[in-house]
Image (tube, helix red, strand yellow):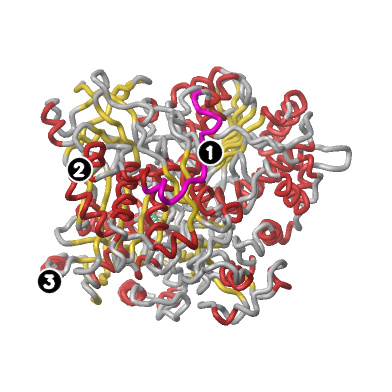
Amino acid sequence: MGNVGRRDFLKTAAASVAAASLLASCQTKEGEPLSQKMGGVEDQLGIEWDKSVCRFCGTGCGVLVGRKNGKIVATKGDPECWSNKGLNCIKGYFLSKILYGRDRLTKPLIRKNGKLVESTWDEALDLIASKYSEILKTHGSDAVAMFGSGQWTIFEGYAALKFMKAGLGFIAKDGVGSNHLDPNARMCMASAVAAFMRTFQSDEPMGSYEDIEHADTFFTWGANMAEMHPVLFSRIIDTKMKNPDRVKIIDLGTQYTRVSEEADLYLEFQPQTDLAIANYFAHYIIKNKRYDKQFVEDHLVFKKGETNIGYGLKDGGADIPKTAGKMEKITFGEYKKFVAKYTAKHTSKISGVPEDKLKQAAEFISDPTRKVCSYWTMGFNQHTRGTWVNQLVYNIHLLTGKISKPGMGPFSLTGQPSACGTAREVGTFVHRLPADMVVKNEAHRKIAADIWKIPVEKINPKVGLHTIEMFRATETGRIKILWTQVTNPYHSMPNLNRFTKAAKEQDIFIIASDVYPTRTTEVADVVLPSAMWVEKEGAYGNAERRTQHWNKIADSPGEAKTEIWQMYEVAKRLKVDEKTTVADIIYNFNQDNYYEELWEEYRSFTLGIGKDLAPYKVLREKHGVVWPYVARDKAVNGKIDFSDVWDDIENTEPNGFTSVKWRYNSKYDPFAARFIKDHPERSFKDGIVFYKAKKNDYRATVLAVPYEPPGEVPDKEYPFWLCTGRVLEHWHTGTMTMRVPELRRVMPRAFVNFNPEDAKKYGINRGDLVRVTSRRGSVVFPADINGRAIPQKGSVFIPFFDESRMVNEITLDQYDPISKEPDYKKCAVKVEKV
Amino acid sequence: MVISSWVIHSSESLFDKIKTNLTAIPNIEITDEQDFKLAAVIETKSTAEAADLASHVRGMEGVNGLDIVSHFFEDETLDKKE
Ligand code: SF4
């Protein structure tokens, strides 16, 4: 085809998919036919299309990947994926480029005489296996840790969980597996997990992204969605444009962002005082009788939490009371009295938000005619009271009954593409097993052991060391072998210098599986080159509980291999006896059908309990499936017959399944419908039931906890708050996006962002070099003023992507005593012009 | 040659102005519109140029958001002689 003809074809194709995307936002039902499906006009150019998922943020946008002559030549937002309805953000331009950085790791490396040198796979794997054998036989499983990722595919996370929690017990001298398995998701959404479990006894949001099209009031809490979840923010803007007078955006934050710019109301609060503001909203709702009395009566239980719970600043959590997570029942009257002290005046004094703004926001959130959605990410989660603040927002939605209905609900967004699918659902945490089960619970261990066909004694009942304590244990020599996969902790840990020093000085064997050289590979003893994204089969689970599968589409470079293969090969080298290896026990899947068999084994944990995942074959076919994906028939789901309530459920599919968009609501969720029908003695007038909250008589918990300051606050010597985070161009530690020349050119280095008034006061101009010092150290950054965001007076913002200037050398390793998630948003620093 | 397409979200009051301003940019062709959103096709020499243009348009007054719909970059990936 000539160039002109090809150009015309491509332009026609581009125009028609763009037109289809305009239309897609008007469609209200998933699965409606769209004019542009996988192929289209461009098929005539010889492009083969396959579905995939964006490799970056937790929005989990579907992407169609076009291949020609074995190479990726095109990408499109997937119009059949309902998470993004055919749109990608600007990072979509660079999706395939992350595969092709010039310094991709292509061969295993082993450290010899202080230097990493190329080796064969056999040499590297034999060395790793011999280290595991030696350490497990000498020290037991307590000396072995793995640090994984919310970017692991679900397959990889499940394989890692089995490796650590089931496999190692067959080699270890103590005969149990290791629970020292945590994902980097500990650093991004553990607070949301803890809060969901404490409130509903089931993890993950109840609503879906479709809420955006049904809602008319959006509260964003410290979440710069315009830059961090741009496709979702586009959907919010779309909703607003359709009804600009009615739809309101209320932004609450510690810095003015693009979201603040679009907002109808912006509340700028002092760091950590979101706790006080949320309590004020609850007080306003009750005082003005805006709460839903029936909902309160039917669905809620009130509790007060333990206070003064510490900050995890002492090793081993020595400053945390054992009762930190305790919640005690109180009455509604006692709760009302508790929040009554959060008057507008008192809250304004703590938070710095003017009283009239607090009242305006409270009016919007409590107005019974408004459909309210609340969104947040790291501002809440990376917080020394992260679990509390998540729960305080649930309080608001629970008191007003604005939950589990289209257009209403609290929604914690995720930062990573599979923080939900891999970390939370698979349960790659130190205390977890799949499907919200925990190692401490004997019945849960028994279920896992039965599925895994291993003796239950092999599963260690003792909760492992969570991320911060795991890395602190590398300082003391307790952890002797650490395998990191798809993550870069020696860049992203807070108070980083102490951990890097330990990695260099202690006798610890570090294995890093990654795609590019990173700060972590720099301290590793063995580096394993990994396949990434569409170079392997995979599946991710996004923030709206959508599981998305993709096939292998491209080849990986050199000798790079999947983590699934790497773990299998190590397990194969770990001999249980003459005839049996660890791989024979934990990875006993047919090699021709490995992924399907692994998936179906994992899926069996989820069936019939409201966490039901879709069958492998359905996932391969569909462009994402939201769970619970419930089978009507007991014969299929293995536990419950839904046939007598099935006709009342919306969105059932002809195949006898339904994908639940609003959990706990009997109009959509067969588990809720079943429960209500089976419990005629209880009042469920609105058709809602929190059926997972068995311990609380199927009621959600409203928690009374106060405002408490963070572990370090500015003072005379260190007068500024330091907040860290991401920028639009770079993702996490920049290991992928800094390899894309276009992104590196636009944002080549980290900066320190000042409020213009502070900059003037300190005589700092844009581009000046500024030394930022905390009690942990100093790093020099160029100054930015009047950039895309404006920090409030008395605070600075520094992004963490830049490995040449690592802000984590000065952050503080304080954490939420309940979720154990570190707080990267608040510590005290001083600044001086260099 | 890199061909891509976008959806541009515009404010109501500046919709016409944004349309006029975009039409004046030679690489951009407005192909459709609905509810103060524009569909556009972009022809550039490289992905870098397309991304720069996207950043520029995203920063324009009255532009509330810009999403990428499709991105064809065959000439950057495959040998041009193919
Ligand atoms: S919004 Fe997130 S998932 Fe969607 S294209 Fe952008 S980076 Fe990828």
Q: Quadrant of residue A578?
A: top right
Q: Earlier in the sequence, mark 2 or mark 1?
A: 1
Q: Look at discs 1 and 3 and give the one toward the viewer.
A: 1
Q: Quadrant of residue A169?
A: top right
Amino acid at dot 3: Asp
Q: Secondary structure at mark 1?
A: loop
Q: Are marks 3 and 2 in contact (CB under 8 Å)?
A: no
Q: Are marks 1 and 3 in contact (CB under 8 Å)?
A: no
Q: Which residue is mark 3?
A: B16
Q: Quadrant of residue A794?
A: top left
Amino acid at dot 2: Gly
Q: CA distance from mark 1 to mark 3?
A: 58 Å
Q: Which residue is mark 1?
A: A326
Point out which mark residue A107 bears.
none
> From what the image shows, is residue A832 above or below residue A697?
above
Q: Secondary structure at mark 3?
A: helix
Q: Secondary structure at mark 2?
A: loop
Within 10 angstroms of label 3, few (less than 14), some, or many (20 or more) residues?
few
Residue A274 % position (x, y): 32, 43
In the picture provided, is A361 more to the left or to the right than A574? Answer: left
Label tally? 3
Q: Quadrant of ligand 1?
A: bottom left
Q: Are marks 2 and 1 in contact (CB under 8 Å)?
A: no
Q: Are marks 3 and 2 on the same chain?
A: no
Q: Chain of mark 1?
A: A
Q: Which residues are magenta?
A: A319-336
For image coordinates 32% across by 42% down, the residue present is A276
The answer to whether residue A811 is visible is: yes
Q: Which residue is mark 2?
A: A787
